[in-house]
Image (tube, rainbow, N blue to C red):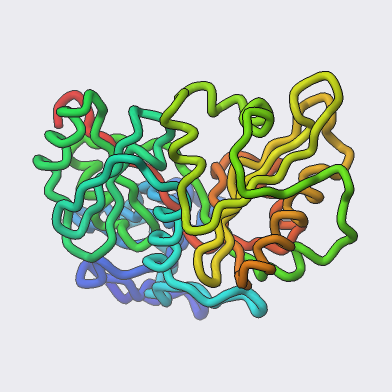
Amino acid sequence: MDISLTGHLTVRVQPADVGKRVSLRSLTEPGDSAGRFTDTVGVLTAWADGVLHVTRRDGRSVRLSASALVAGKVVPATPARRRGLPAADVAELTAAGVRSWPAPRTERVGDWLLRAADGWTWRANSAVALGTSPPDTGRITAWYAARGLPAALHLATGQELLAAELEERGWTASGHAVVQVAALAPIADREPDERVAVGRTLTPAWLAGWPRAAEGPGVAEEVLRGGPVTLFALAPAPGGRPAAVGRCVVDGRWAGFAAVRVDAAHRRRGLARAVMAALARAALDEGASAAHLQVEADNTAARTLYHDLGFADHHHYHYRSPGPAA
């Protein structure tokens, strides 16, 4: 399709562009005389019978009628990187994320790393691609079933075609998250806060400050201790659970932040920023220069905090699990 609708709006997308990233503008309702539009950016994953399927960076799919299109074009697969952010591709950050949250049981099946941790956290109980080959879903499903776990695939931006294929097969999406990156030094650039101490030992006091660890006793500690160089920040509170905690794994140039939590009774006192800064200083001392983290897509408060600290979205990921008919 290459139809000029006005002097400015042109559709230059066609079925041969399936697999490419596109930017589309369409009428909210076909034939809408009021001219209400919606914009969609993502990978064109299918075009059949007058219907387009576009999968966004977060793995969510959109169906559009070809008759409703008023403008469209193929766009670069990777958006321009903001100046000052560390350069990295999805594969590098995915691998760093795997090493920073290591599952106690793993097995390689083709280009996919299968991870299991007794069901504690999706990140440690999903298969992640470390190459470009498609997943052997039969072997992967059997591997997880043998461990009493549901199969789950970690799918990142760039795997939209696979996400669309699995959706057609009944695999459902969950756990939508964003990987963010930042330069490390600016995070550390604040006066040290005497309320926060950083060490290399996972202590009972730290675990008390992150209640989610209690959901997987034993295996949680095993995952949390893992990583090339693991740092734990702790802000004690007299007579109760810690005021704040945080974790950071240094892996070459990368400092991976996770498990940053401030107790409800101690919020709005700058502790989250103090924990991040203390971990960043310790990571700089270990030779790191860039930061990454993973945050739930709908966690507005955390994303606002990280944005204020200099983080920017790098890519999205989500999980796919087989439905009843898969």
Q: Position of residue 103 (x, y in %)?
A: 36, 42
Q: Is residue 35 visible?
A: no
- Left or right, residue 179 beside residue 171: right
Pick the residue in front: 306 or 218: 218
Please name whichever residue, 69 or 257, is drawn nearer the observer in this view of the structure. Answer: 257
For the point 84% across and 30% down, the residue is: 266
| Quadrant of the image occupied by residue 93 | bottom left
- Residue 255 on image: x %, y %: 58, 61
Residue at position x 10%, y 42% in the image: 139
Q: Nearer the viewer, residue 22 or 304?
A: 304
Q: Quadrant of the C terminus?
A: top left
Q: Residue 325 versus residue 105: which sits nearer the camera? A: 105
Quarter of the image for the N terminus: give it. bottom left
Q: Pick out the residue farthest to the top.
A: 239
Placement of 203 over or under 135, stated as above or below: above
| Residue 165: x %, y % from top left | 20, 49
Position in image of residue 276 (x %, y %): 73, 52
Q: Outermost residue toward the left?
A: 138
Image-based side of 12 in relation to 312, left or right: left
- Would residue 13 be seen by someone viewing this image from the given angle? yes
Give the residue at x 38% y 55%: 156
In this rendering, the count of numbered labels is 0
Residue pictured at 58% horizontal, 74% vertical: 86
